[in-house]
Structures are given as C-alpha cells and as structure tokens.
C-alpha cells in the first residue's frame, strides 16, 4: 500500500472511530442529526453509484426511498416489529420494481432516462397519495416503530436513540464498504467505461444495458434502505417522500460533497443537514440560502468540498 | 512524512470536535430563567393566514402575563416561534430542535391535524406536552389519544354536530348535499361527523357529490365545481380553508355555484377568507374560533382591547379567529402550572386534566378522559351586502356549548 | 350523461390545455434553441403572477388588466435576459448536469426572493368586474375568465407562430435550433439569438403566470407543481417541437378536466402515466424528431 493510500486509510479509520464514539458525548439532538446525516449519506451513495459511475442522472430515486419507507412502516404496523422481515420486504419490493422500471428505462438515452425516472417517482407519489385506505394518503403513517432486532439469543429494542444510531451506523459501514469494493472492482471499471462512451464499451463485448440495470437496481436498493431507516428515525411515512423535491436532496448533497469523490456523498450529506438545521433557525430563508450555495458551487466549485480537499491532499478520497 | 499524517489527522479531529461543540449548545439550568413555550404553526405558505395570527395571540398572552401578572410562578414567559409550513416532517424537526436545543417542554400551536398526529409520538418520546390550537380531527382526542396532547379548541364532531343542528333548523327542506373538502384527516373527520348528524336528523339526507381535492392545491377547482353543479345539490358543505378556500370561493363564484344552492356551510372558515375575498364573498353559514360580537364578558372586552391596541383594529378583525386559541393555550399553561405549583411535566399534565380556565369565550373546561376542551362555540351567518366596504356583513350569530354534544369518554376514545 | 355538461368539461379542458401550452411553450423554445431544460420555469411562471399581483395594486380597469398581464411577462423577460447574460451563458459548454443544476439553483433563489419580497401569506388577485361572472353555454354556465384564458392563450400562440415563421429573428432562431454551426457561419449573431430566445421563453412563462394564476392563491413555492406538469407536456409533445407542445398540452388539459371530474382517483397520476407511456413507446414524443 503506497503513501497516499495509507493517508486515506488512516483518515477513514479516524472518521470511523469518531462516528463510533460520538454518541457518548453528543447531546440527543446532535445524535439525532448525526443519525439523519448517516441515513442521507446512504441515500446519496445510492445516487452516486448511478450517476458518478454509471453516468445516469435520475430524478426519481425518491421513489425507492419512499418504497423502502412505506414497506417498513406498513410491515411494522401490520405484521411484525422485528426488523428482519420488514427490511427484507423493502429490499425485495424495491428490487422487483427497480428491475422492471430500470429495464424499461436504461434503453433510453440519458435525458429521456432522467425524465422517465421523474415520471415514475411522481406516479408513485400520486398512488401513495390517493390510496388512502392503504397508505394513509396525505396523512401518511404516523407512529412508525423503531423496530426490534431479534437475534434469538437476545433482543435489542431500537427505541433508544443510542441503539438506533448504532443500528444505522452498522448498516451504513457495511453498505459503504460493499460500495467501495464495487466501484473499485472490474464491475465499477466497466460501468465507468460505459459512462464515458457507451458505444465503444459495447464493442469490447460488454452488454451495457445489463450493467446499467444492475447498477440501477443496486442504487435503488441503497435508496430504499435509506428510506426504511429514515421512516424509523422520524417515526413517520408520508407521500412527499416520493416527490421530486426529495429526489433533489441526494443530488445536491453529492454535489456539495464532491460528485466524483467517494467520500463526497457522505460529507455532502453532513454539510447539507448541518446547514439546513442551523440556517433555518438563524436566517429563516433557507431556500434562498441553499439556492445561492448551489449556484456558487455550480459556477465555481464543481468538484465539491471533498474534491477540493482531494486536490490539496493529492490523494484519492 | 509520518508527522504529516499525524498533523492532518489532528486537524480533521479538531474540526470534527468543533462541529460537535457547535451541536451542543449550553442547556440552561432551570432557575429564574424564563419559561419557554414552543410555538409551531405555518407562518408562511397557503395557510400562513392561520398560523401567523395564532402566534400573535400567543405573544399577546405572554406580554400580558409578563407585564401585568408577574409571569408564571415568578418566571417570565417566552414564546419561541417556529414555522411548520404545514409539513409534518418540518414540524417534527422543529419540535425536536426546540426541545433539545432550547429545553422546551411545553408546546402549542398546530393548525393541521396531519401535523398534530405526526407530533404525537414525538411528544411521547420527549415526554413533553402539546396543546393543539386548531387541529380538529376527532382522532387527536379520540383514537389517537395521547396523554401528552391536549386540545384547547373544539373537535370536528362537536362543531359539526352543532352546525348540523343549526342548518337543519334553518333549512329543514334541504336534503341533497354536495361536499368538497381537503383530502386528509381533517377534511374526512369533519365531513363524516356532519353527514352522520344530518343523516340522524333528516330522513332523506343524500350525498349527490363528494369531492376531495388535494389539501393545499390553492386552485384548479374547475372540474370539481363542474361536477358539483351537474349533480344539482341544494346544500353545499366544505371545510377547505386558508388559501384553498379563498381560491375555491372565487372560482365557484364565477361558475355561479352559490346561486344554485340554497345553503353553503362550513364548520370552519377563518376570518381572513372573507377579508381576502371581499366582494366575491358568498352567503355562508360558518363557525370559527372567535367572533368578537358574540362574546361580551369582561375578559372578552379586555382581550379585544389589548389585541386592537397592540396590533390594530383591522388586524384584529381579520385574525381574531386564530389568534384567540393561541392566547388561550398560553393561559392554559399558566393555569395548569399554577394549579400544580410546579413546572414538572407530569405535575402540569395532571393539573391540566379537569382544568377550567377563563377565556375570551367564557369558561373552557378540559375533560380529563380525553383532554378535550368544552366551551361556547360561535356560529355566524355571513351575507353579501354591496353597501359595505368589504362587500359582506354578519347578519346573525349565536353560541352553542360543546358540552351539549359530549359523549362518554370510552366512546370518544374510539373516534 | 348530459351533453351540456360534457361540453362544459371539454371547454374546461381546452382552456386548461391552452394555458398549459402557454406555460410550456417557453420551455420548448428554450430547449429547441439552447438545448437547455430550464428547471426554474415554474418559478418564473410564479414570478409573472406575483408581478401581476403587484401591478394590480397600482392600477385597475379592464384594459389595465390586459396591459398588466403583458407587462408582467415583459418584466420577467427582462429578468430572463439578466439570467442568461450572467449565469446561463457560462454553462453552455458544460456538462448537462451543471446546466440542470444551475437552473435548479435558480428555482430556490427565485422562490426565496419571492418569500422575501411578497411574504409568506397567500395573495389573491382581485380582477376587474368585466372578467368575472359566467356565460351561458347550452344551458350551463361557464366562467368568463376561463374563456378569456382560452382565447388569450390562443392569440399568443398565433403571435408566436407569426414571430417564428414570419420575422427575421424568428427564422434565424429556428435556423440556430436546427444547426447552430452553419447558422453562425452565415454571419448570424448567435449569442444574440440565444439571449433573445431565452428571454422570450422566460417572458412567455411570466405572461402565462399572470394570466393563469389569477384565480389561484399565490404563495412562494406554487411553481413546483406547475414545473413538473410542464415537463410532462414537453416530453409528451416531443422536446423541441412547438406543435407537439400544443397537441400535448391540449390532450393533457382535456384528460385532466375529465379525469378530475369523473375519475379523481387517477387524475393526479395521469400526466405522469401518459409521460411514461410515451417515453417507453415513442420517446421522441408525439411530434418530435427522432435524434
């Protein structure tokens, strides 16, 4: 392992340790925010895989966020409070829907793909909204449980903020690790070659549609798990989770953090939520503030915060 | 080389500690610090006309308590205001922030039943109290009853049963009804209760049109109006409110809907609507949270005078509806805390049960079993009058006491 | 089923459809000439409505109202020029993502400024008496204002055609839409075309806001849902085809009017279902060119 990689590994370990020991001295609102950041980080990673590596911009990842959220919320309410089945339901439902929608979508060019993902997300929003008897309509599903982890030898109730935080953290670490392996593998390389030039990559014997579909499904599952965690954290599910404004959040977060940097999505989520919480109470006009921040980044800081740091350090973050 | 890594790691660590430090603001010890009440309502957006006046009512109560009554048990009252934009996700976030960052244990406000229901688990988790000042859905003090949530206004059932009685008395021949209400808990709860009571009172009650536009659509009611007119109703019921109702009245006016029906009624129309719509107003039998002419107690006069002195007569007339529950909620906390002689949440909660407070509307009594307030509710008939500057005037009013429609606690908790 | 009511529903649909066309036409123009999807389109529509509201506070009268609607369009058009010169110009050569994100940032800036300037309370436009009330059509009533919207939008549509096909500037912009390199080589001032057409697209948005939102309650953020409907319209019609936009807008307007009346459960999802179906079956839209 060379010098750069050692630096990066060290930093990653530092951040990891920080995340693990944080709950001990963070006040409860801070812990709640950190928990939210991790969940949105996961959501952003879903987007990041699809966009930064496969090159496909999706305006509809909120659909899977919502599918995950509602699957878990409804399962908790009607079937069981132990996490295994609800989360499995969320993953399976998402995988099925994503495979179908993804199969239909990836055959189109990038622009049409973006519009189609948007159309599907809005459709799911409308269905969730009007299917009042099942989803609660505009009222959503209040009082969603935090869940119980049942290991047969012991049960852990996730109601406590500390327990739920570690639950989220474990899932986050695991999924981020998997994603890292994925993007540094030959699969990731193939994806990037498809992103760069889809025709040329097909000449090398690769079936671009199949790779794109797999990336799409994996991305959707990440978004779905993030949604499932989000609904447990906030204890509610509501139709707006599928609205395009929710799709915009991981895009903005990844952009702020660094769209071509692996650590970008997570740090972007951290910065975004931090700003959102404190700007809202201090300045009030959060919308205007965010618009200006985004404008500045698009015009002057394309690489995002971590991209900027990456340049300075000369390392690959 | 190695020192570089160490230095960089330390820098990262320090930045992170800094961020953590920023998170943890000092939590004030509860000595003679002001008692903070957390107020959450829509201050911007389509329903700002309800939330913003409510905050003003609460602020006035705080001012009066601090300046004329020596605070609550010697502590000044401070109202911290947060904008919910009628979105549950934002309201929940604000509630957590107020509780964790500012140490708030007593909350008030809330216009939307959806928001109230979303806040219930959060209030229970944080073990804080909430007095809802406008959300009407029966579930809040019924099926979704929470020991942490109280309601200082009436609920959909009481209000709509009383309204149904009045409408039935005034318009005994009207049997064919159309409904257009927002598609969420509040809209459904109100219509269910109104139609339930009407069915009981009027044999032959039929619903010829049942429309449910999206809550917060703010416009585009053409097809709904078209459908209603095609059904030829004699009576029209709607609990659209805020920006939705303003747009609906204006559009329906163009279609001539109000000329076709014999009666147009709503269990809740805020004063900001007729003041916004002016000459486009419709003949409407409505209920509200407050109507100054209907109440003439010393406290009513005192409250009205204070509102006019602080905010101006025009503002008072437009916003009296939602300002009053905000005012009442603050005084409810005062009364409960003084009764409990403590700021402890459990003690205050216990004190609030079976509490009677003095309000501009007379005595409000909070029942222990369901945390629901019962009092004299105002009912008003607004008619068009080209001679008036606004284009309309109030031609009739009355008050009805909610206790008349009270049902046993076990039954109430099922709704 | 009463044919009179069906006729009213149809008129409702056409009136809505023409308004959708007006709203979406600016988006089509911007895309066909500049190849940019302007996400801020909905916010610009809202801006036009707010300007109209403010101007209505100052003037009153029947002709004044028409003038106000036109003026609000022009003001927004001028803002469009500023946006093009200072921001959009910088990203012509950038990746699509940054173009999209720039216009996305503009949504938030415009909505945020609207909150600052006009406040959070819902605003209502009090129209002159002439435009209010209803006309009797086949024994049923139909609002005068909806008729006004229908004809007003049709007039603007005709003017737009005249502009694009009969004037030099219009012809030059169509040339630039077809092939920008050759157009430039012919000595036509392409940057001016870009700026002008962006401004016109934006002006159309402002104008459609003033006209179309007159009966609604205005709040900052009212543009979000309108924007998404406009995207549906341009995708269904075919990106870059104005005729396609017209066809799609009318179809969608009529479907929505009937949908809201008879099938409210699916009416909300309808534009997106149609949008998805078109993208899957005929991605270039009804009248778009296959790229």
Image (tube, coloured by chain):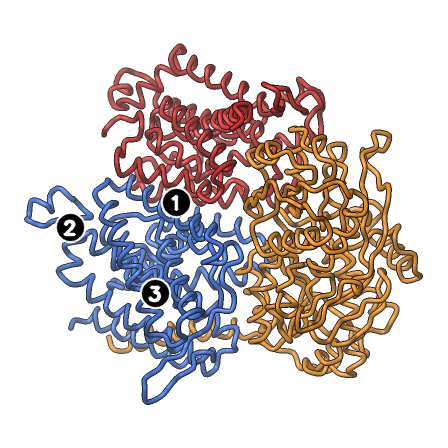
Q: Which mark is residue A193?
A: 2
Residue at x-position 76% and y-position 50% = B287
- State how far apart marks 1 and 3 are (Cα): 26 Å
- Letter of the chain in blue: A
Residue at x-position 34% and y-position 60%: A223
Query: Which of the chains bears the disc numbered 1?
Result: C
- Pick whichever, A44 or B338, lies toward us: B338
Label 1 SS: helix
Mark 3 residue element = helix
- What residue do we see at 54% from left, 54% from top? A286
Labelled disc at residue B368: none
Residue closest to the far top = C166
- Of residues A121 and C101, the one nearer the viewer is A121
- Note whether B298 is above or below A204 in the view shown: below
Q: Colour of chain C?
A: red
Chain in orange, by letter, is: B
Kindly identify which residue carries mark 3.
A225
Quadrant, the C terminus of chain B: bottom right
Residue appearing at x 15%, y 59% in the figure: A187
Residue that carries the numbered disc 1 in the rendered image: C101
């Amino acid at each position: 392992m060379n010098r750069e990689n050692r630096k990066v590994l060290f930093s990653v370990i530092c951040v990891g340790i920080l995340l693990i020991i944080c709950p001990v001295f963070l006040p409860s609102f801070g812990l709640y925010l950190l928990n939210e950041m991790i969940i949105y980080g996961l959501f952003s990673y879903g987007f990041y895989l699809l966009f930064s590596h496969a090159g496909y911009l999706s305006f509809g990842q909120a659909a899977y966020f919502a599918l995950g959220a509602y699957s878990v919320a409804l399962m908790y309410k009607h079937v069981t409070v132990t996490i295994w089945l609800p989360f499995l339901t969320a993953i399976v439902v998402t995988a099925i829907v994503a495979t179908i929608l993804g199969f239909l979508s990836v055959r189109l060019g990038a622009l049409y793909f973006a519009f189609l993902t948007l159309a599907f997300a809005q459709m799911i929003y409308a269905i969730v909204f009007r299917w009042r008897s099942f989803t609660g309509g505009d009222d959503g599903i209040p009082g969603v449980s935090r869940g119980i982890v049942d290991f047969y030898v012991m049960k852990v109730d996730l109601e406590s903020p500390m327990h739920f935080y570690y639950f989220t953290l474990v899932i986050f670490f695991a999924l981020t690790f998997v994603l890292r392996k994925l993007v540094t593998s030959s699969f990731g390389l193939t994806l990037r070659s498809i992103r760069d030039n889809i025709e040329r990559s097909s000449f090398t014997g690769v079936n671009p549609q199949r790779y794109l579909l797999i990336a799409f499904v994996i991305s959707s599952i990440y978004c779905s798990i993030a949604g499932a965690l989000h609904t447990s954290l906030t204890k509610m599910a509501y139709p707006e989770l599928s609205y395009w404004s929710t799709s915009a959040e991981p895009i903005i977060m990844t952009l702020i953090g660094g769209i071509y940097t692996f650590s970008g999505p997570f740090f972007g989520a951290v910065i975004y939520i931090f700003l959102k919480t404190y700007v809202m109470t201090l300045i009030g006009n959060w919308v205007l503030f965010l618009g200006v921040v985004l404008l500045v980044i698009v015009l002057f800081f394309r690489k995002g915060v971590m991209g900027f740091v990456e340049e300075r350090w000369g390392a690959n973050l | 080389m190695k020192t570089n890594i160490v230095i960089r790691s330390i820098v990262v660590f320090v930045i992170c500690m800094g961020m953590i430090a920023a998170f943890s603001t000092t939590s004030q010890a509860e000595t003679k610090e002001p008692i903070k009440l957390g107020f959450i309502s829509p201050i911007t957006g389509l329903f700002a006309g309800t939330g913003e006046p409510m905050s003003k009512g609460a602020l006035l109560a705080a001012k009066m308590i601090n300046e004329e009554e020596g605070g609550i048990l010697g502590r000044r009252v401070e109202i911290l205001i947060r904008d919910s934009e009628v979105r549950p996700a934002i309201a929940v976030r604000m509630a957590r922030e107020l509780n964790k960052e500012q140490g708030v244990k007593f909350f008030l406000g809330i216009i939307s039943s959806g928001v109230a229901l979303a806040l219930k688990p959060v209030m229970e988790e944080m073990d804080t109290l909430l007095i809802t000042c406008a959300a009407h859905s029966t579930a809040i003090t019924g099926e979704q009853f929470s020991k942490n949530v109280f309601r200082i206004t009436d609920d959909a059932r009481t209000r709509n049963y009383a309204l149904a009685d009045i409408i039935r008395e005034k318009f005994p021949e009207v049997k064919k009804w159309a409904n257009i209400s927002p598609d969420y808990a509040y809209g459904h709860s109100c219509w269910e209760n109104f139609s339930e009571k009407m069915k009981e009172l009027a044999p032959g009650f039929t619903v010829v049109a049942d429309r449910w536009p999206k809550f917060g659509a703010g416009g585009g009611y053409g097809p709904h109006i078209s459908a209603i007119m095609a059904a030829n109703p004699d009576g029209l019921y709607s609990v659209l409110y805020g920006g939705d109702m303003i747009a609906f009245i204006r559009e329906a006016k163009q279609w001539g809907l109000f000329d076709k029906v014999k009666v147009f009624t709503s269990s809740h129309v805020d004063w900001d609507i007729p003041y916004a719509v002016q000459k486009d107003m419709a003949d409407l039998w409505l209920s509200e949270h407050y109507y100054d002419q209907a109440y003439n107690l010393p406290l009513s006069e005192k409250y009205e005078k204070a509102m006019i002195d602080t905010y101006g007569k025009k503002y008072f007339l437009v916003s009296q509806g939602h300002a009053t529950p905000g005012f009442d909620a603050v005084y409810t906390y005062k009364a409960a805390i003084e009764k409990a002689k403590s700021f402890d949440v459990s003690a205050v909660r216990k004190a609030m049960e079976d509490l009677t407070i003095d309000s501009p509307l007379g005595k409000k009594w909070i029942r222990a079993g369901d945390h629901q307030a019962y009092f004299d509710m105002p009912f008003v008939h607004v008619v068009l009058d080209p001679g008036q500057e606004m284009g309309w005037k109030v031609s009739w009013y009355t008050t009805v006491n909610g206790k008349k429609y009270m049902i046993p606690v076990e039954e109430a908790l099922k709704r | 089923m009463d044919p009179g009511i069906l006729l009213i529903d149809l008129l409702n649909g056409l009136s809505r459809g023409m308004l959708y066309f007006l709203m979406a036409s600016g988006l089509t123009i911007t895309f066909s000439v500049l190849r940019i999807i302007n996400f801020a389109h909905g916010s610009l529509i809202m801006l036009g409505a707010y300007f109209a509201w403010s101007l209505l506070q100052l003037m009153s009268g029947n002709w004044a109202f028409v003038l106000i609607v036109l003026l609000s369009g022009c003001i927004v058009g001028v803002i469009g020029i500023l946006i093009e010169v200072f921001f959009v110009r910088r990203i012509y050569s950038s990746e699509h993502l940054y173009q999209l994100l720039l216009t996305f940032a503009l949504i938030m800036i415009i909505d945020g400024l609207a909150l600052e300037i006009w406040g959070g309370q819902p605003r209502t436009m009090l129209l002159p008496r002439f435009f209010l009330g209803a006309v009797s059509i086949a024994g049923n009533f139909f609002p005068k204002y909806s008729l006004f919207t229908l004809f007003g939008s049709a007039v603007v549509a005709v003017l737009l055609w005249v502009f694009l096909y009969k004037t030099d500037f219009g012809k030059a912009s169509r040339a630039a839409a077809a092939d920008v390199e050759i157009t430039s080589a012919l000595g036509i001032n392409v940057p001016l075309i870009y700026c002008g057409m962006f401004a016109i697209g934006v002006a159309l948005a402002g104008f459609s806001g003033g006209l179309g939102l007159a009966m609604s309650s205005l709040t900052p953020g009212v543009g979000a849902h309108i924007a998404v409907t406009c995207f549906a319209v341009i995708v269904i019609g075919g990106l870059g085809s104005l005729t396609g936009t017209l066809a799609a807008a009318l179809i969608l307007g009529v479907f929505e009017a009937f949908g809201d009346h008879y099938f409210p459960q699916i009416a909300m999802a309808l534009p997106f279902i149609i949008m998805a179906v078109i993208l899957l079956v005929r991605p270039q839209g009804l009248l778009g060119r296959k790229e």
